[in-house]
Every structure is written in structure tokens, then in C-alpha cells.
Amino acid sequence: MVSSWNSCCASRHHRHSGRSVWEPVSSAELLVKVLHTLSLSRFRTLTPFSNSSDGSSTDGSGNEPKETVTQGKPTTFPNPSAGGGSNSGGSSTPTSPSGTSPTFESTSICQGNICPSVLSVAQYASPPTAFLFGLGQDNAVWYRATNGEKWLSDWESLGGDMISQPSAASLDNNMVDVFVYARNNTIQTKRYYNGKWNDTWSELGKAITSPPYAVACGDQQMDVVIRGTSGGLHRIYYKPYAGWSGWENHGGGLSSYPVVGCGPGPWRLAVLGYRGTAQPLFTSTWLGAWTGWVEAGGNFRGQLAIASRTTEESLVFGITVNRTMEYYNWTKTGDDETNKLIDLGGSFQSTPVVFVAGADRLDVLAVGRDDRLKHRALIGQTWAEEWQDLGGAFNSTPAVVSVVPGKVSVYGLGVDGALFHGTWKVQAREFEWKDGPDWLADGGELSLTGMKFSGV
């Protein structure tokens, strides 16, 4: 089933939530792992790790056999100390009216930083529903649901005592999973299914040093990645009727937490992260087994975003150390001319957010250094001539929701942690978004900070 205007990919099954950084990643290599086959014509394969930069040792294949992530049991947290949240998700404490015009502060907290993404979005197609998650100022996870035309709920607390921004994914209609790093140094997860949340949080793993990052690249599997205590990439996946796998250790010596996205074609994953004291981009492939890490070039600051328009390409976007945006177009059969970094210009202070509406169109968003939202579209192989200024005043990386065909809503946080959004009309062959925005206040008291992206 295909949703015409999905916030992540052309299929409703391709969903992931974007993440950004609060502190810049200076002097760090970006690493990427890709599941299944991408062209390596341009890439230089790295030698196996030995005594990695974070002090961990490996077995020569990138694995770190001494480091394990263990799975746990359902967890009951005490009620949050503030805000009245509950473990069952039944409490709601709206803090400001919805539907009114927000008041924008003159200066964003993003000034001088790479603005963090503290919002996560998961959506499904039937009935059209999007869930927006954030970490509350009471350290509980909060969410609100929309059908693209109106809110379906007020702010609801899922409880917990958490320290990271949440990550959410949807594997099927009427099903959403949310993951978060708890104060007791474990990954906690909670599921929404057929209109009801699980009563308690479940422990998915421990021995971690990063927030979890989740993605569903099809209707048969959901993947979660983390960084282990010695810097290794760890992955766990869920399959319907089979449940959760065990944890896999893929090494890497990461100095940042890993980010996962959908690679070109079905059942392909791309995992990104930094390592060491340089700044090039890396990738590796799946050829029946995970391979080593591979260099691909680049000089970025903060976290990247990945998206696929077709089964033949993946595009990775990032903000350079000079604050411009660049992207890399991976193709399965590409050469040096195709697989190269392309400069999109601009001047930014947030991680990019990518919105894919089908095989022929891609839209990218980021917060400019004037605090305002910027937008640019790629239709076919042609980019809009310049960045479109969409206004607003953002204190986080934007979150994109599109569950109504031809409409897109962008959400952000005010300096007080309250949510706001604007909505535009999008026509397939027009570069600019139209008829917006009438910015609306959506309430809430969410945290503006999350776990920093880089470990260096």
C-alpha cells in the first residue's frame, strides 16, 4: 500500500524518525553501514579495526566479542516527579491552548549550535494517523496524535524516567513502537496497538551509551540500533509472529550514536555514525553478511539524514563545517561522477529533514541561521533554483507530517518547549509549497535538549 504523501518514503512501510545534534561533531569521521548491495566503485575499504579510537578492541572483522547488550523484562517506573504523567499513558496536562497563534521569540536557542531534533514522528496509512513524540520537561515521554486535519488527542504522558529524545516507528496500521534511553541506563520500549498502549515499559537492552534509533523499512521488520559501551554498533530487530531477535554486534568504534535509515530497494538498511579524529563519510554493504566500514568522503558537522526515492538510489544530506548543506547520491551502479557530494548552499543550524513523496520528488528542510525554516525540492533530477523561506522561529530540528494527500505540516518547538506547526499545499510538479503557513500553537512542555550526537 502506498501513501501519496508519506513523511518518509513512497511506501507507508518506509518510516523513520529524524535526529539531530545539540553539540557540533568536530573532528569526527562519519561512518555508514548499508544492508544489501550499493556500488563501491568510489569507496576505499578500511582495514579491520584493532584498538579503536575509543579504546575498544575487535576481532579483526569489526566485531567486539567482549561487549554484549542484554535484553530485559517489562519495567514499571515511578510516576514522574512533575507534570502528572502516568505509566499507562492516561494522563494529560496541556500547558498552553491549541489552535492559537504562537509567539515567536526573537532569538532561537539554536544560535551558534546545530539545533537538536527532540521530536519523533511515526505514522500509518489506515486510518491516516501520525503520532508526535517528545521528552517532557518532567522526563516522561509525551505524545499527541493527528489525522492531518485535526488533533485526535490532547497531550498524553507515557510515563517513565527518561534522559534521551524518543525514537518511534510504525510497522503496520494501528501499531506504533516508541524507544527511549532511561535514567537506569537501559533501552525502554512501549507499544501502541489497536487503540491501546501497553501498561508498562519493557526493557529491550542495557550496556549502552546512546539513545536508540528505530526504523521500519517494510511491513515485515523493524530495526533498532544503539552504540555499546565500547563504541560498537549494536542492532536488534523485530519480526511479526517471531518477536525480537537477539542483539548483534557489528563493531565500528563509534564516537557518535548511530543513525539508521532505509537504503535503496526493499530490506536494505543504512547505518551512519562517526569514528576517530577525521571527518570523511563512510559506508559498507551487506553481501550475505555485514561487511567492514568504508570511506566515501565528506566534511560534516552533526548528524545526517538519509532517504530513498527509488530502488536504485539513496540520498544522504548533511550540514558541512561551513554550515552549507551537501548531499550524496548513492546508486547501485554508479561511478565517481554519480556518487559524489553535491553542494546545495544555504546557511543552517539544524540537521536536515528529508520528505519523500514518491519516485520523482524529494523535499528537504532545515533551520536557517536566521532561525527560520528553509525548504528546497528535487523533482526528477532538477533542484529548485533557490531555498524557499517558510518562516517561523525554530528551537529544534523540524518534524514533518503528511497523512493527507497534497498537504504537509511542519512542527517545531518554541523557546518554552511548546509545540507549534504550519501547513502547506504541495503540488507534485511545483517546487514551492503554497498557501501557508498560518502558524498554530499546539501546547505541551517538551525538553529542548537531548543526548548529544558525538562522543568526542
Image (cartoon, helix red, strand yellow):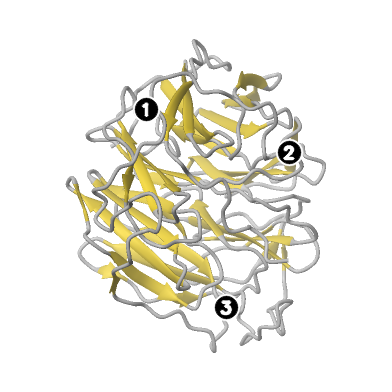
User: Which quadrant holds residue 57?
Assistant: bottom right
x and y, in percent, of residue 268 in the image: 46, 55
Question: Where does label 2 land, which residue?
Answer: 111
Q: Is residue 392 above or below residue 49?
A: above
Q: Which circle's residue, 1 or 2, is located before the other in the chain?
A: 1
Q: Give the mark toward the camera: 3 or 1.
A: 3
Instruction: Pick whichever, 286 or 261, lies toward us.
Output: 261
Q: Secondary structure at mark 3?
A: loop
- For image coordinates 80% across by 60% down, the residue present is 27
- For image coordinates 66% across by 58% down, the residue present is 40
- For image coordinates 51% across by 12% down, the residue present is 434
Q: Which mark is residue 59?
A: none
Question: Where does label 3 land, which residue?
Answer: 229
x and y, in percent, of residue 93 in the image: 33, 41
Q: How many neighbours does mark 3 have within 10 angstroms: few (below 14), some (14-19), or many (20 or more)?
A: some
| Disc 2 residue type (three-letter) | Gln
Q: Quadrant of the C terminus?
A: bottom right
Query: Is 252 on the left or on the right of 215, as rendered?
Result: right
Question: Where does label 1 land, which residue?
Answer: 4
Regarding residue 313, the answer to whether it shows in the image is no
Q: Give the mark toward the camera: 1 or 2.
A: 2
| Disc 1 residue type (three-letter) | Ser
x and y, in percent, of residue 357 in the image: 45, 30
x and y, in percent, of residue 140 in the image: 40, 55
